[in-house]
Amino acid sequence: MFLSLAPLASALPASAAVTQLDGTRLPTPVKEAELGLVRGRGFPDNAVTLDGLFMYRGEDIDPVADASTDPGVFSPLCGFTGELVLRGGGCKVAFGWYNATASGMRPPDNQIYELIPDDPSVAFRCEDNDFCPLATMMTTQMGQHDWTPTTFSAADIRNDPRYQGGLVGFALIGKAGTYCTQTKFSQRELNTVCTNCTPNAPWVTTLIYTSTASPDAFYVAFEDLPVTPTSWKGSQGGYENDGDFNDFVYYITGVTCQGGGQVCDTGLQGACAVGRTGCATDGAPECLAVLEPGEQSERCDNIDNDCDGEVDNGEGLCEEGLVCNRGACVPYCGRGEVVCDDGLVCEDGLCVERACAGVTCEGGQVCVGGTCVGGCDGVVCPANQECQLGRCVDLCAQIECEEGAVCERGICQSNCGCRTCPAGKTCAADGRCVDAGCEDKTCAAGQLCIGGSCADACAGVICPGNAPCVGG
């Protein structure tokens, strides 16, 4: 590769997440000759490494351990944008998107739609057209190597007449008359097959990284020079690929993997139990926590906000003279006129079952009839509510989302006009995914639309402690 700029050598995991067909660990460490080019222009070594790129952009990404060839295709959302964030190759090539097909056939050249142009002066307004952008603008020769980051938008690709309604892939578009004549695809299966490998399989020419700093965002990193059926390094004008994968690195937003971005169960406690599907290294969705235990403080709202297995615990939840009880700040019992109902006694300012007085349960359990039991065992909450330590609560009751987002199970995410609803669900006018057939239904008070029909909101509900369900 000419003017090849690669990641800085560093402590790496014992085994790589991605290996080339000949066993080469990817991405490869930097070569000293490439670092010399960087130093000669006043930049630090990591200005041209994937390590540096991710560090400067506030990402918690290990270039080797987190490298993947999946997802090769993406589901487009609203706000589809692309930005060239690192360029260690010298070619002037464009970046585009295409409609992925089930057949796995390469798209014709005229069906790869340019998103980022090949002209450096337009793509990133760079003074040194062969040497930027880099991971950082920090240089001892300020003024000589400046560039202006430029974001290119396809707006709402879902309304683009060229979009066919399915998944999309990305391509580094080869250009005749340059060293980089070969188009490289985000879908590995579309790239050149190694004919002297057993078994025959496509060379790895693209690495995918999922952003940890922003939802629905990915980095797509390419080797730019052509590969051949017998060598991933190739040979073009005396230059060859070196496997550093920083020739062209693009940052893409407004896309997710197939099945990604859906609300899911993490297996954690409290508010941390609800997550969002992301992308595993094999392309299958995995449930990622949106909140980690202890990330947010406890509030008096009937929800285990800090995910420690207890609801509304902690100091200072209420004003002086009040105690938090079932999500509301109320006067202490045993003081003034507050008297507990029959069958309850006052303990530590709260009314509890007589049989539970003096009983302390472990996290995740509640006292019922003097015995500690799983607070949600056997409980079936009304639709749109979750069981939290023996109480059915609406996790969205106290959540305010930004414009264009809606709350589902306590998580703000794009309205469903900008994402795909799960199987059996459809997009309603309020931006939420609802049961198919319910998008145009208006039900009476005390009813909910389930499966396309209005039904009693308490139908099938089993409240904690077998309490009666009233109005859902």
Image (cartoon, rainbow, N blue to C red):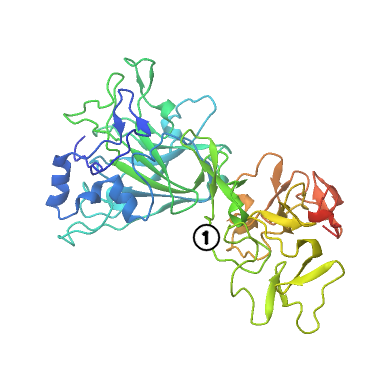
Q: Which residue is pictured at 30% across the width and 35% down the height?
A: 223
Q: Which residue is pictured at 67% across the width and 57% down the height?
A: 361
User: Is residue 390 visible to us here?
Assistant: no
In this view of the protein, which residue sits in the foreground, 163 or 464?
464
Q: Quadrant of residue 209?
A: top left
Quadrant assignment for the C terminus: bottom right
Task: Residue type at mark 1: give it.
Answer: Gly
Q: Residue furthest front?
A: 358
Q: In what element is the residue under mark 1? A: loop
User: Is residue 302 visible to us here?
Assistant: yes
Give the side of residue 360 with respect to residue 454, left or right. Answer: left
In this view of the protein, which residue sits in the foreground, 231 or 381?
381
Quadrant assignment for the N terminus: top left
Q: Which residue is mark 1?
A: 294
| Label 1 Cα neighbours within 10 Å, binned few <14 / some 14-19 / many ≥20 | few
Q: Measured from the top left, where is residue 319 in percent x and y?
A: 64, 80
Q: Measured from the top left, where is residue 353 in percent x and y?
A: 79, 64
